[in-house]
Image (tube, coloured by chain):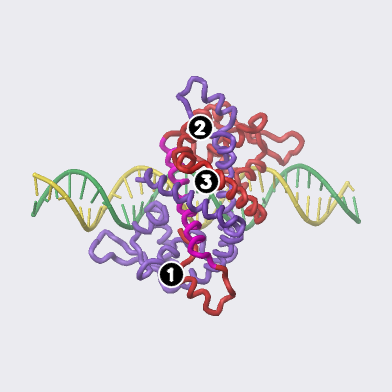
Chain colours: A red, B purple, C green, D yellow
DNA sequence: GGCAGATAGTTGAAACGTCAACTACCCGTG
DNA sequence: CACGGGTAGTTGACGTTTCAACTATCTGCC
């Protein structure tokens, strides 16, 4: 829940290459971000567990598909969009395919490729889960913040996302 | 990476209890938060994997301990502070204990209790890992944002944390 | 003092995620 | 056209997390 400590700072600065530690205000903000995210995601997860047969991750996957023409996306594009490893996506799609929520199809014109297609059952489950999901997101985040706060939060995390992307691959 | 879709919205509003969907700006902010957090945590994790023998989670655990008098905390307090399940903490401490980073001790006066104590080796590893950690947090988040943005982000996530806490337990 | 229910922590199996190795295919260059 | 390197996706083994069941202890109350 934290980045450092006064004592870590003291110990680490003895004869080490210099480190730009966080000042107190930054430290507070950083910890609030960490703790907030941890508790928020945990609560959102619980909301799904107890109210929908769709975990948060599966929900996101179906949302991503639902926005594509044909409700179809290549495995690689899906992995990138959801920031999942390819192998994790393979396993997840395996499980969802067994439950009949998605299907695999060959990509026309590239025999390496595999398309992930949402089934009708997947669509129906997504539609049934959406209200619960949105309600939880509102309850836990959107409605808790001032509109400007939420907007700044979005802008800030957009910047962070762009920065983190440059360190991928 | 998203909360809903125009089409989910359309489908779900047919004869359903009314749902307050997110408007476009809220949707953008929400997705930016999701994607930003996913990519940020992934990048921070990678920074630890390739530069420290301490995973991000283990690092947080040691930081938490480092701030306690005696570098000691009860298992339950540690679990609460890190927003971990008790069982997850048990397993994590098992592994760290095997590596000699922490130790278990009986809690005086409550024979159910177990204290988790950071060892000297744990402390040394924490101190060695801190500069890398802080550098990554700066590079990926703090230095990417305007000071006010970061401050608002912290305040906002503080509110979210408080709200999420009311739904725990 | 003893019982009911809460709290602390652990356990082991199943579900999930990661990692490195692997197959298969694509594309550019000589 | 072949071969070298890149991309797509999967696999299985291994490590981690979750979940429900369990033991042990504590606390309040009769």
Closer-to-camera residue (A66/B66): B66
State the separation of the CA atoms marked 2 and 3.
24 Å
Residue linked to disc 3: A149
Q: Mark 1 vs mark 3: tell me if same chain.
A: no
**Magenta span includes A54:** no
Chain letter, disc 2 residue: A
Residue displayed at 45% across by 53% down: A35
Residue displayed at 63% across by 33% down: A67
Residue linked to disc 1: B100
Crowd band around label 2 with a 10 angstrom C-alpha radius: few (<14), some (14–19), many (20+): many
* Image depth: mark 2 or mark 1 in front: 2
What is the count of numbered marks? 3
Crowd band around label 1 with a 10 angstrom C-alpha radius: few (<14), some (14–19), many (20+): some
Q: Mark 2 vs mark 1: tell me if same chain.
A: no
Chain letter, disc 3 residue: A
Q: Is residue B150 left or right of residue C6?
A: right
Callout 2–callout 1 Cβ contact below 8 Å: no
Q: Answer whether residue A18 is visible to the viewer in this image.
A: yes
Residue displayed at 39% across by 51% down: B85
**Magenta span includes A47:** yes
Image height check: is B119 above or below A37?
below
SS assignment for the magenta stretch, majority? helix
Residue linked to disc 2: A130
State the separation of the CA atoms marked 2 and 1.
46 Å
User: What's drawn in magenta, residue-wise?
Assistant: A21-50
Q: Earlier in the sequence, mark 2 or mark 3?
A: 2
Closer-to-camera residue (A14/A62): A14
Chain letter, disc 1 residue: B
* x then y, percent, for residue B48: 56, 62
Provide the secondary structure element on which disc 2 rests. helix
């Amino acid at each position: 829940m934290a980045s450092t400590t006064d004592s870590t700072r003291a110990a680490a600065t003895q004869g080490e290459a210099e480190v730009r530690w966080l000042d107190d205000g930054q430290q507070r903000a950083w910890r609030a971000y960490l703790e907030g995210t941890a508790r928020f995601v945990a609560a959102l997860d619980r909301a799904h567990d107890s109210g929908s047969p769709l975990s948060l991750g599966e929900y996101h996957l179906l949302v991503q598909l639902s926005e594509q023409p044909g409700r179809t996306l290549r495995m690689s594009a899906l992995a990138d969009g959801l920031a999942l490893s390819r192998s994790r996506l393979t396993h997840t799609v395996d499980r969802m395919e067994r439950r009949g929520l998605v299907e695999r199809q060959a990509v026309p014109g590239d025999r390496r490729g595999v398309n992930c297609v949402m089934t009708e059952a997947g669509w129906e489950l997504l539609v049934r889960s959406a209200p619960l999901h949105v309600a939880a997101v509102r309850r836990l985040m959107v409605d808790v913040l001032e509109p400007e706060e939420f907007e700044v939060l979005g802008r800030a995390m957009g910047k962070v996302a762009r920065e983190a992307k440059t360190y991928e691959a």
